Amino acid sequence: MAAVGLAATAPKLEPLSGGPPHPPENPPTQAKIRLGEELFFDSILSGGRRRNCGTCHKRELHFMDGLSRAWGLDESELTRKTPGLLNVGWQRSIFFDGRVKTLEEQVSKPLENHREMDLDPDEAVRRIRGDRYYVRLFSEAFPGEEITFRLVAKAVASFERTLVSYDSDLDRYLLGQDDALSQAAKRGMDLFTGKAQCIRCHNGPLLTDHDFHFTGVLERDGHGKAGDKYKTQSLRDVLRRYSYMHNGRMMTIRQVIEHYDRGGSAPEGVQAEIRPLGLSDEEKDDLVAFLRALNGRVHRVPDTFPEGPGQLADTAAPESVPASSDSGESGAAVDDPSYLNR
């Protein structure tokens, strides 16, 4: 019985599909999503109108910024890297330290940070109320309601939940297409779920346990305390990123694998939650081949949304876009026209 119980709870890999759930108080509508997208890319939401959400979450860079760490409004590096937004609607907490739990709650945080967007949310509302175009969009998205920052947050969060990435080679393999993975990727998957122990924290449809761990990553420039725990990042589209770890300390996926292989780089007196793995160079190559199979082909949920609460998975299947011809390596160009020209 004990063995059966362990098998039932063992972490596993699962395909991802459908759309993220929406809170009952913020059901998706086309008008709300259109409004959220307009606000996301409009510098009306920043002090001095110098930037917008899309400044650091660029559509053409998979909603990342292409930098090792985020670049501040004061023209200096911030302490952490810019997280990507694809699949953010499935996250159980937001930011590397998980300090907020919902996308709606997250929207105000960059505005309130003087090094990011530097705008009081009340001032943002005053600006929007004085803009006839936005007054019309809000009346369509939230008929009969007064414009407040709560509605701004609902609209932006609704747009962000449309940003997805799935239909990867791994998804296809897990759904029964045996030739979706190369032999190297299959060997890498065996390492991922076995000797390399990656699946302990990177599991389920999103390839994350949504938990917090210290994996021996050194802090940069005195920011953070040795031993601080950070949220397990999803590994979907991991080879389309520009840096790794919460502080962008590593620039390539190979550096990440080397870090885990040696058991981390924790300072004396601090114990990481990982141990040396003893991987060969060939095994590391196979792991990279498997991680490359996590690049998605679908980058948006359906254009038709339910008018009431529920999950987008209950609607028509998402549109599948052609596979990008990028190399899958960090910093590779994105050339999928259906994605770039939405």
Image (cartoon, rainbow, N blue to C red):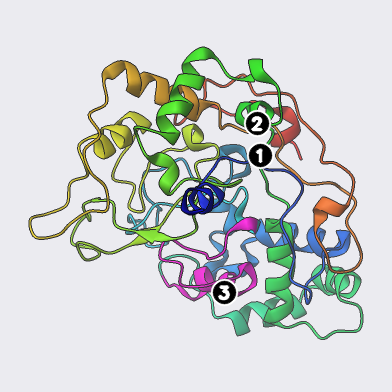
The answer to which quarter of the image holds residue 276 is top left
Q: CA distance from mark 2 to mark 1?
A: 6 Å
Any mark on residue 15, and which?
A: 1
What x and y, as percent, mark residue 304? 90, 51
| Residue at x 28% of width, y 45% of height | 249
Nearest to the observer: residue 241 or residue 342: 241
Q: Earlier in the sequence, mark 3 or mark 1?
A: 1
Disc 3 on helix, strand or loop?
helix
Any mark on residue 174, and which?
A: 2
Alpha-carbon neighbours of circle 3 within 10 Å: few (<14), some, or many (≥20)? some
Disc 1 on helix, strand or loop?
loop
Q: Amino acid at mark 3?
A: Ser
| Residue at x 78% of width, y 32% of height | 320
Any mark on residue 108, and which?
A: 3
Marks 2 and 1 in Cβ contact (< 8 Å): yes
Viewer can see residue 329: no
What x and y, as percent, mark residue 94? 52, 64
Q: Nearer the viewer, mark 3 or mark 1?
A: 1
Q: CA distance from mark 3 to mark 1?
A: 32 Å
Viewer can see residue 110: yes
| Residue at x 22% of width, y 29% of height | 278
Q: Give the answer, above or below, for where 119 lies relative to 211.
A: below
Q: Amino acid at mark 2?
A: Leu
Q: Give the answer, above or below, for where 102 lies relative to 78.
A: below
Find the magenta span and give its range: 90-114
Nearest to the observer: residue 224 or residue 145: 224
Q: Give the answer, above or below, for where 79 lies relative to 109.
A: above
